[in-house]
Amino acid sequence: MSLSRLIGGFVVRHWRAYAASGLMLVGIAVLIVWLPRQVGQMVDALLARQLHGTALLRELGLLLAAGVAIYGLRVGWRLQLYAAAYRMGVELRTRLYQRLALQGPRFFQTRRTGDLMALATNDVDAVEMAASEAMLAGFDGTLTLVLVVAMMTLGVDWRLALVVLLPFPLMALAFWWISRHVHEASRQALTAFGQLNDHVQETLSGVRTLRALGLEARSSRRFGELTQSAADAGFDAQRWEAAYEPAVGFTLSTAVVLALGFGGWLVWQGEMTVGQLTSFGMYLGQLIWPMFAAGWVLALIERGRAAWARLEPVLAEPLSVDDHGTVAAVQPGTLVLQDLHFRYPGQAEPALQGVSLQLPAGQTLGLVGPTGAGKSTLIKLLLRQWAPQQGHIHWGPWPLADYTLAALRAGIAWVPQEAFLFSATVAGNIARARPGASRAEIEAVARQAAVHDDIQRLPQGYDTPVGERGVTLSGGQRQRVAIARALLADAPLLLLDDALSAVDSATEARILAALRQQRQGRTVIIASHRLSTLLDAEQIVVLRHGQVAERGSHHGLVALGGWYATQWRVQQLEASLDAE
Ligand code: ADP
């Protein structure tokens, strides 16, 4: 969709505001062209000594009233228009936000957070300006231009008007040339701002690591470079935008010279009165605004177009996870994974190849294997963050793809290794899984997740704010709060992706025991490095290089004498050394 269609659609939807603004502008334009004519007639009448006393006062009063009316109408159209323009900003930002909220990992893998934030602020602002200021100033300028030129031609003298307008086509040519540069410079300025934003965002979210690695100086240098190039690009865009003004100034000066020369000659020849020349001069002065407006409008439109060219692909990008399913509530049953193959975009090696397994409802599956074996990937396929390139997943009577994403989100509770907490209180964070949960319910799940005692020791207990991303909690506390949140969701499928890695083994054992007790038919999949976590799992699958290398119960796998048995011995030895 082009920018003009976007704005056109918006104008149609909000036609009342635009029509009201347009009508007020017409009122202003009519008054503005009436004024010079009136003044010209007054000058002639004064020169002929025909205007004095109350008649003169009345004429002056009329001029004053026209001035006040112009002022009122100018305020009126701006109020109307800006209200509409802000609505457009809200609409665009909402569309962008909703789109981003629906996109999956594939989308975010190729986009930068800071740049997306710049799109939602800077670029939307530029489009908003094109839909408001540019539209109406363009309309106003064109209207004034047409009326003023008509008055010059028909109301004063067409020969003089023709001569005076001669330099204007040259100005149009200059405008066209400048606009091309403004577009390119604006595009670069917006992109540079996006890069700068991205650097700030990344630096702030990784500030601890940055400091730990002693990279502050390097990061500051990079910031200096980026902010300099953003400033340069912004300056370049401003410089091109400023080029409109000299073009206007030069054209108008030439026009004034022509008006005085040719107009003076006409007066000399007796073909024109001084009053008429005065009116003509005033009309010429009134052309200043439409000319400057043209430059300004073109600059705003080019900036808006450059911003829209960055925004549109993001809005139009198909969702990375399609949501064509129709089954609106999950029907828990056996999970069947059949011959799954999956390769991340741009990767040479597949992350999963030919994985098949069956997990009856209510059972626990343990996923183990070396780092990078594909455990998290398998879990992400179950969450439908990615779709397998080959093979099927069935849950209960339906293929996973037949469920709506909303149904899956409600039916699966997932705890990743990097538990994410929101800037809210501890209770608020747990309650995200089920807004409206009572304090008793929140405390019950916190007890199951073995984090209740920790929370009680916090300064304000459950009402303690956890800071951005939960910075005020330890890694293990964060993980357990995230587990409590997942338990509150009470979903039939619980996925724990190395979710207890920062918790000591005794606490882990307590959590797992509570999980088993409260399970009530819940299917659980646990990816873990600590094999002791999985002793009670009905099934354990060892993944290596994306393939199922071993499978069975704990005892079966120990007896098998493969990777699992070796790992088990190593971990037992470590545990006994730790205990000493
Ligand atoms: P595990 O959870 O067993 O440690 P993963 O499932 O995270 O392993 O990773 C399996 C393989 O896929 C690894 O080789 C990893 O580098 C690759 N991988 C994981 N996530 C991505 C991604 N988002 N993009 C590209 N490759 C990925």
Image (spheres, rainbow, N blue to C red):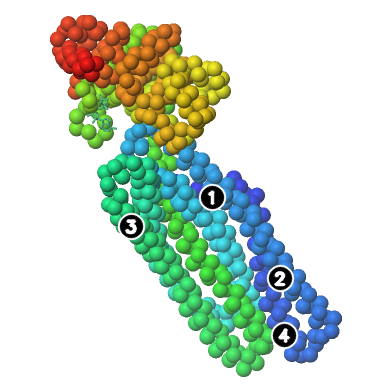
Q: Nearer the viewer, mark 1 or mark 3?
A: 3
Given residues 97 and 219, the one toward you in this image is: 219
Foreground tag (4 vs 3): 3
Q: Is mark 4 within 8 Å of ligand 1?
A: no
Of the two numbered discs 4 and 2 on the same chain, state the one appearing first in sequence. 4
Q: Residue at x 63, y 85 (%)?
A: 277
Nearest the eye: 177 or 391:
391
**Residue at 16% across, 14% down:** 566
Give SS at disc 4: helix
Give me the disc on residue 8.
1
Q: Which label belongs to residue 224?
A: 3
As helix, strand or loop, the secondary structure at mark 2 comes to helix
At label 4, counting other C-alpha atoms closer than 10 Å, the crowd grade (few under 14, some 14-19, many 20 or more) is: some
Dot 1 or dot 3, earlier in sequence? 1
Q: Please name the residue that numbered disc 4 is placed on.
A: 43
**Relative vertical location of residue 311 with respect to residue 252 in this rendering, above or below:** above
Q: Amino acid at mark 4?
A: Val
Tell me the distance, in whole angstroms, between the alpha carbons under discs 4 and 2.
18 Å
Q: Where is residue 354, by image quadrant?
A: top left
Chain-order first, disc 4 or disc 3: 4
The amino acid on which the numbered mark 3 sits, given as a three-letter code, is: Gly
